[in-house]
Image (tube, coloured by chain):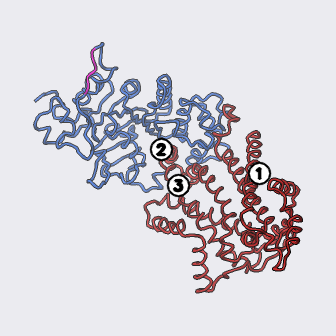
Chain colours: A blue, B red
Amino acid sequence: MNNMGEIVLSVRDFGVEIPTRQGILRPVDGLSLDIARGKILGVVGESGAGKSMTGNAVIGLLDPPAHVAGGEIWLNGKRIDNLNRERMRKIRGKEIGMVFQDPLTSLNPLLPIGDQLVETIMEHLPVDKKQAMEKAVAALDEVGIPAAAQRIGSYPHEFSGGMRQRVVIALALCAEPSLVIADEPTTALDVSVQAQIISLLKRMCKERGTAIMLITHDMGVIAETADEVAVMYAGRMVELGPVRDVLTSPTHPYTQGLMASTPLAAKGNKRLNQIEGAMPRLDNLPQGCAFHPRCSIAKDKCKINPAPGMDLNEGRAACWFADGTKQ
Amino acid sequence: MLAFTIRRAFQSLIVLLVVGLVAFSMFNFVGDPVDNMLGQERTGADIERLRTQLGLDQPFPVQYYRFLEGAVQGNFGISYRQGRPVSDVISERIAATLELAMVSAILAIVFGVALGVFTAIRRNGWAANIIMSLSLIGVSLPTFLIGILLIYLFAVELGWLPSFGRGETVDLGWWRTGLLTESGRKAIILPAITLGLYQMTLIMRLVRSEMLEVLRQDYIRFARARGLKDRSVYFRHALKNTLVPVITVTGMQLGSIIAFAIITETVFQWPGVGLLFINAIRFVDIPVMAAYLMLISVMFVSINLVVDLLYFAIDPRLRADRSGSGK
């Protein structure tokens, strides 16, 4: 934890549990990460790797019976994982904003977007209705809604998908949170619009110094946007580091496989690799390192011992062979 | 929207005509009113004279046409049994029925919606489970049995409430109400519960299932992620989105409350149009039956019309003339 003052979000040894009839599942386990002011941390991984679960846990919106099980979450130097419902609610929207995947379903279809903005602003900022309205117009203007003052009374269905995602971003940022969790913010959008939304997010965060946790499975988005990248596999973080290092010289065999199977990173016209097999189900995690059944360099000790923990400062991978030895 | 209203009104008119036609054709099978109207010592000539006088010697389409002709002028003929204009007989009693229906409908809607929201929010709580189990009784017990049970408990055993009649009424000139006297208010409780219990449980179960569906939607998650209060999430965002199906069913149920007041009115000897209708059937009082059926169908049809218009008020996506204007 270097630069304490700069760190916005700090997650330490954090876990989520879901009790089921078959036993306790751990969709997120032993997770530690930091995001500094104005920085973007990309969280990548396959579906079910625990990316969204992590985002939901940070903002305190886990769906029961899923619950936080151990570890700590610190936001701007305050511990937030043990707050009660009401205090956590006040943090949501005010200090942590969230952008969801599908802008078509994120907005209440029956309320004008202006009303949704005003209610959020008035919930978190000490303003009256008129000031909130002005702020709402300014927020829409800032995210690039043309003629914001005229569109404030429009309903969500009167906007296109890209415009709606802009409205969603305006809503997530209108109380000026210090952290934004963007859960697959461009996955549901047209490719041509994706770049606009990404650059909008980037610009807004740069201007305000907002930290972003960008959850995605799109390596292209990560490469363009993120400062750091965390790779998740079966609920655990397997690699963390500056985006350039992880993309160009991945350390963990899973990340290597991931990069080799991504068109962006696979140079030339050679065939894309695939990682054999599938991610294990949470109720059937293998003993030892969760990745060993699919790993090309796995040895006997990988089948018995869980992968070693990571040292955040060194940005290395959770693998017995992270130091480059293949023994 | 005006075009829509006019089209619906026109369709409603056709429905009314058809209902009248069907009703009229059935009157040929309910018996011969002349039998009841003339005493034991009638002659063939008496019967013929009366038939001619009542217009019963005419073919069925002519009878129907005459009825319609009178109906548009507000003249529904003379009751065979009471010898007074049907419009007088009905208007004396409609207040009692409408008052009963209104009170039950309000009970059903208020408690139905409130309990529905409650059981959806606390869907695993013990109170919600008890309410859900009890609601099965309301759905499955027949109305007359509920009425008799209530009479037995509250009128016979406990002696708190009257078991029949309407209590004292106050004449407001155009409306004879029982709600302004204490005995009138006491008298309406049991019949209103009896009449509205089924509708209440139905609305409650519907609201609950719709709420559960809506609470899973992204915009509810997003509303929570923006830090809105539970009250706002549940009532402003969730409840409003459940209203379209709820209003559809509630509207139809309002019609049935008025129509099926017959049973409740019989059980409680409530002096409304339902009781009047039952007596009219016994006596083959065709003008009264015809007027009653027309009245009920007018109510059904107009409630449906109102429901259709309410959709527009609730769901902006249906207001096609607004889209794109952004005003």
Residue B17: image tag? 1
B228 sits to left or right of B273: left
Q: Which residue is mark 2?
A: A95
Q: Residues within 10 Å of mark 3 (few under 14, many from 20)?
A: some
Q: Give how far apart the Cα atoms at labels 1 and 3 are.
A: 49 Å
- Looking at the picture, does residue B60 appear above or below residue A171? below
Residue at position x 63%, y 52% from top? B248
What amino acid is labelled 3 in the image? Asp
Q: What chain does mark 2 sit on? A: A
Residue at position x 64%, y 66% from top? B107
Residue at position x 72%, y 55% from top? B22
What amino acid is labelled 1 in the image? Leu
Q: Give how far apart the Cα atoms at labels 1 and 2 are.
A: 63 Å
Q: Magenta stretch?
A: A270-274
Q: Quadrant of the C terminus of chain B?
A: top right
- Between A190 and A316, the one lying in front of the other is A190
Residue at position x 76%, y 75% from top? B178
Q: Which residue is mark 3?
A: B230
Q: What chain does mark 1 sit on? A: B
* Residue A276: percent from left, percent from top: 23, 29
Query: Element under label 3?
Result: helix
